[in-house]
Image (spheres, rainbow, N blue to C red):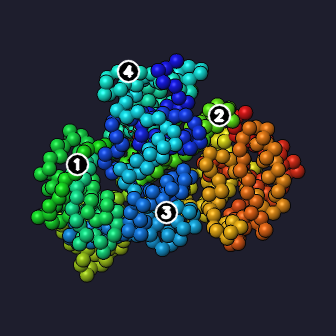
Amino acid sequence: MGDIQTDVLIIGTGPAGSATAALLSSYGVANMVVNRYRWLANTPRAHITNQRAMEVLRDLGPEVEAEAMMHASPQEIMGENVFCESLAGEEIGRMKSWGTHPLSKAEHLMSSPCFMNDLPQTFMEPILFKTACARGTQARMSTEYLSHVQDDDGVTTTCRDRLSGKEFTVRSKYLVGADGGNSLVAEHLGLPYEGRMGVGGSMNILFRADLSKYVAHRPSVLYWVMQPGADVGGIGMGLVRMVRPWNEWLIVWGYDINQPPPDVTPEFATGVARQLIGDPDLEIELLGANTWTVNNCFATNLQKGRVFVMGDAAHRHPPSNGLGSNTSIQDGFNLAWKLAMVVKGEAGPGLLDSYTAERAPIARQIVTRANQSIGEFGPIFEALGMDGGVDHDKIRRNMDARADATPAAEAQREALRQAIAFKKYEFDAHGVEMNQRYRSSAAVTDGEPEPAFPADRELHYAPTTWPGARLPHVWVFDRAGRKVSTLDLCGRGAFTLLTGVGGEAWVAAAEAVGAELGLTIRTHVIGPRRPLEDHLGDWARASEVRDGGCVLVRPDHHVAWRSKALAAAPAAELRRVLVSILAR
Ligand SMILES: Cc1cc2nc3c(=O)[nH]c(=O)nc-3n(C[C@H](O)[C@H](O)[C@H](O)COP(=O)(O)OP(=O)(O)OC[C@H]3O[C@@H](n4cnc5c(N)ncnc54)[C@H](O)[C@@H]3O)c2cc1C
């Protein structure tokens, strides 16, 4: 017995821990979070918030999504992605990014009811944390995780109250390590990792200054400054990132990882800001500075017994593609419903094994993509002649040469255009964000092979109801004519069965099987004169089943199973599938 009892103890109140706590509380599961600091994120690290992460907030409730959107910078002002010599200096090129190119925007609009946006972590964390606490999470700040032991019935975790110095124990059924890139929980579990930590050094310089005159006409969240002299740590580039338009900024600047981290004094920070902005008289209000390391490392197993890791504890990578916080929130969406169903006795503990099976491949994929994106700046440096070291005169000559009226300069310009366009894989990779398809015991095959991706799978989302894929979003209409996303029909901690005209037997089957298994299974019939109408025909196209078939959707919007047509014995089929998924 511990000093405190709860069902799930979560270490960390970052995006992963706070999202998991909010979801568990929404599902009615007792949980507690601890954070070694007295408050949440004090720097606006994560900011690019993708549609899939926003779908998790929407699942928490329209008020949670609305609050996030109220604080976010909207997608429309995110996307010019400028490459320049300095903000005041010459522009080298730019690319439409984050779903703002008209073609990409169409894909975004068709894929989700939610919008990509720029929501700094200093806003996102309080929204998730507040939601968790308001719904029942017990939170202990200034409380440090020290160790844990697990047995057949639960986990006993030792924590220290940092205010009193006193240690206490928490007894829980499950423990979640959402304790970030230096996870002690993961270390204590001895989980296997691939890759390396500390492959590069970076520093953040956070400041206020009104830079409207340099940026408002080409609104973006990221301004990449490529200039001779900006090559600390061999990067040759500095990043000026918008935190709040257009008066709060974060400069990301490299340092040589083989040297000790630099002392970022106010004079140094001001000097870097003036250099990258290109204004020697610029006055900044320095808000803070810190150093961090670029990692290239992911866990290949995310759990041991009753203990799980998620977020940066499981995947450690640079900010490229903006995948960290987004993936951390999605890890929580994957694990929370499983924990809830096991704690409530609706599922056997075997369901929890699907967490590693489903999320470890994502950890590998995003770490690989984020690190690859850094390398893909190479062709831009090459085209500018910046790849040959730090000979500033030579770099200057190469930069100047691109304006010449010579065949060589024309070739250089073409190479530069292509190199910038190729950065779509970092700044507009919708497929990376949305194409997560799971293969595990928690998605039951209907015998169909996985559909191929018709276009580049990193750039373009390919909707399908193939079991394991995220349910495609389309708009259907209720009896009052209001549009409802298919995703809104699902989630909120329960399984959902979608069927059409002639599929009513599935509804009766879901009621019977749900009653037998002690499970809520929501049902929706979509079709003419049914509670939901498919006026646009989009559901008929997206569902990939006949009207009398069905799509069974998990609480995290992923397809659990589907039947192309009405089965001879719908209840028996549904029972077989759910018993298998729930490890009953
Ligand atoms: C410059 C920069 C820009 C970024 N941009 C983006 C972006 O645009 N989009 C994006 O999705 N991601 C981005 N990221 C990544 C993102 O910040 C991380 O992926 C995210 O914070 C990970 O969330 P987490 O909850 O797993 O861990 P963290 O946010 O690191 O939270 C860990 C939590 O655990 C607590 N903790 C740790 N150890 C203990 C202990 N022993 N006891 C008690 N509590 C403990 C901490 O106090 C904290 O509450 C960026 C990162 C950086 C550095």
Residue 121: which numbered mark, if any?
none
Q: Quadrant of ligand 1?
A: top left
Q: Are marks 1 and 3 in contact (CB under 8 Å)?
A: no
Which residue does the image show at 32% across and 27% down from the upper left? 162
> How packed is label 4: few (under 14 Cα within 10 Å), some, or many (20 or more)?
some
Mark 4–mark 1 distance (CA, rounded to whole Å): 32 Å
Residue for badge 2: 344
Residue 288, numbered label: 1
Mark 4 touches mark 1? (CB < 8 Å): no
Q: Secondary structure at mark 3?
A: loop
Comparing 316 with 289, the one in front is: 289
Q: Secondary structure at mark 4?
A: strand
User: Would residue 41 be found to the left or right of residue 258 on screen?
Assistant: right
Q: Residues within 10 Å of mark 3 (few under 14, many from 20)?
A: many
Observer-side mark, 3 or 4, equals 4
x then y, percent, for residue 277? 20, 64
Question: Tag 2, which secondary structure?
Answer: loop
